[in-house]
């Protein structure tokens, strides 16, 4: 397995209807469909079935040097079977089959899974390693509902601005380089290929056009969405390539075909030419924080809890997040990594500047009740218009 598929096409083909149910059904004491959190654990069942992004559940079969699953199996006696998926929509549909105990879900899929009753609340008191997880990742809108936790954080990362230092010798500190000033490098600007990239434009507009009243980049009414779409349509003339395969972005920066655009830290770490830098711009940035969740009808709930606790343990979490290319979920994990500084692990101020991926829904995520916000289907339609 290579790294190509690890986070490509994350936000394609969402079934938004299931997310819209979330507000209507109410989950003040746990989802009525997903059941209640476990009060205590019993004997391990001997196996656990896990659904995850490529690179999250490695047992040495893809690379003998990459294996954090075997230690879990030895410690618990729970044999792991796993399946990878390429998009959140695929993951959601696979979970509906009922064949999995655990899923690693991104911010779009997690709320859909809660709304549809496919995942259960998680009693974090039963997880020894939960306390060590960074507080700024806990009980957030993408992993909790009405104060009820539906999983535990895995790791996190920001969608950064990368630039060629030969072209920008004085550095950059603003997304203006890919928006208002993009024409200066027409044909060599790159952007992430997904409707969720509309949120990146919204982050920029929050800072540069405050009269629009945007307070959450995933909560856009029709006027606000139109402004973001207009900005991206203007940008389109300067974009040389939209990327989802990050190996292609590495190559584009190494050849000089791209000189500025959105990126991940792992991409900049991999560029071999030595003439790129990354920055979290002054306007802030979008990003991700994935969640380990337990199926409401898990056949092996005790082994499932054991996996959540294990993957949050410092050494296992360090191995998994380092392999994927993101910050770990705890500072203790940094004892087993030598690159935490590059990923700003544990820097709460840095993390506070990240707007973690969340699914746009009609009920405004920013709390407004006097308007309807645009849902993901509207964003998907808009993205098709932007790209032409």
Image (spheres, helix red, strand yellow):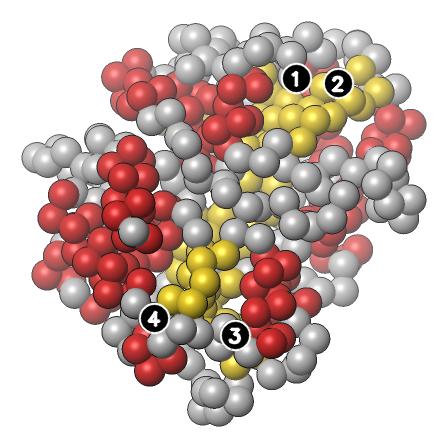
Mark closer to the observer (3, 1) = 3
Q: Which residue is nearer to you in this view: 148 or 190?
A: 190
Q: Residue beneath label 1, please?
A: 101
What is the spatial separation of the Cα atoms under label 3 and label 2, in whole angstroms? Answer: 45 Å
Q: Residue beneath label 4, please?
A: 238
What numbered label is drawn on residue 48? 2
In the displayed structure image, the side of residue 161 where residue 182 appears, left or right: left
Residue in the image at 74% along x and 48% along y? 2
Does label 3 or label 2 sit earlier along the sequence?
Answer: 2
Mark closer to the observer (4, 1) = 4
Residue in the image at 31% along x and 47% along y? 383
Q: Regarding mark 4 in the picture, which secondary structure is present there? A: loop
The image shows residue 81 at horizontal and vertical percentages of 78, 22
Q: For label 1, count other residues whose C-alpha is less than 10 Å away and answer few (under 14), some (14-19) or many (20+).
A: many
What numbered label is drawn on residue 225? none
Does label 3 or label 1 sit earlier along the sequence?
Answer: 1
Residue in the image at 52% along x and 81% along y? 164
Q: Regarding mark 1 in the picture, which secondary structure is present there? A: loop
What is the spatial separation of the Cα atoms under label 2 and label 1, in whole angstroms? Answer: 6 Å
Does label 2 or label 1 sit earlier along the sequence?
Answer: 2
Residue in the image at 64% along x and 23% along y? 102
Mark closer to the observer (3, 2) = 3
Q: Residue beneath label 3, please?
A: 257
Q: Is residue 367 above or below residue 335?
A: above
Label pair 4/3, CB-CB below 8 angstroms = no
In the displayed structure image, the side of residue 207 where residue 253 appears, left or right: right
Label pair 2/1, CB-CB below 8 angstroms = yes
Q: Is residue 249 visible?
A: yes
Q: For label 3, count other residues whose C-alpha is less than 10 Å away and answer few (under 14), some (14-19) or many (20+).
A: some
């Amino acid at each position: 397995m290579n790294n190509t598929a690890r986070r490509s096409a994350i936000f394609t083909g969402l079934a938004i209807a299931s997310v819209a149910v979330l507000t209507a059904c109410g989950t003040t004491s746990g989802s009525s469909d997903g059941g209640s959190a476990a009060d205590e654990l019993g004997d391990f069942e001997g196996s656990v079935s896990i659904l995850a992004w490529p690179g999250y559940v490695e047992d040495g079969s893809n690379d003998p040097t990459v294996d954090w699953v075997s230690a879990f199996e030895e410690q618990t006696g729970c044999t792991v079977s796993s399946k990878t998926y390429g998009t959140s929509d695929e993951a959601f549909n696979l979970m509906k089959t009922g064949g999995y105990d655990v899923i690693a879900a991104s911010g779009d899929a997690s709320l859909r899974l809660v709304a549809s009753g496919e995942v259960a609340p998680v009693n974090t008191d039963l997880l020894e390693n939960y306390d060590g997880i960074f507080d700024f990742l806990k009980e957030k809108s993408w992993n909790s509902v009405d104060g009820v936790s539906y999983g535990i954080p895995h790791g996190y990362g920001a969608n950064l601005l990368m630039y060629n230092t030969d072209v920008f010798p004085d550095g950059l500190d603003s997304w203006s380089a890919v928006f208002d000033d993009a024409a200066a490098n027409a044909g060599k600007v790159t952007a992430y290929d997904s409707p969720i990239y509309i949120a990146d434009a919204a982050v920029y507009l929050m800072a540069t056009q405050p009269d629009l009243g945007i307070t959450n980049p995933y909560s856009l009414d029709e006027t606000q969405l139109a402004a973001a779409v207009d900005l991206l349509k203007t940008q389109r003339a300067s974009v040389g390539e939209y990327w989802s395969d990050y190996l292609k972005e590495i190559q584009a920066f190494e050849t000089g075909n791209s000189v500025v655009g959105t990126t991940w830290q792992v991409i900049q770490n991999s560029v071999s030419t030595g003439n790129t830098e990354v920055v979290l711009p002054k306007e802030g940035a979008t990003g991700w924080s994935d969640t380990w969740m337990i199926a409401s009808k898990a056949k092996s709930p005790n082994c499932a809890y054991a996996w959540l606790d294990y993957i949050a343990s410092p050494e296992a979490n360090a191995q998994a997040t380092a392999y994927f290319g993101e910050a770990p979920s705890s500072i203790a994990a940094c004892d087993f990594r030598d690159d935490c500084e590059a990923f700003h692990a544990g820097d709460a101020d840095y993390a506070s500047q990240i707007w973690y991926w969340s699914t746009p829904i009609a009920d405004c995520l920013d709390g407004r009740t006097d308007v309807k916000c645009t849902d993901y289907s509207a964003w998907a339609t808009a993205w098709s218009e932007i790209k032409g």
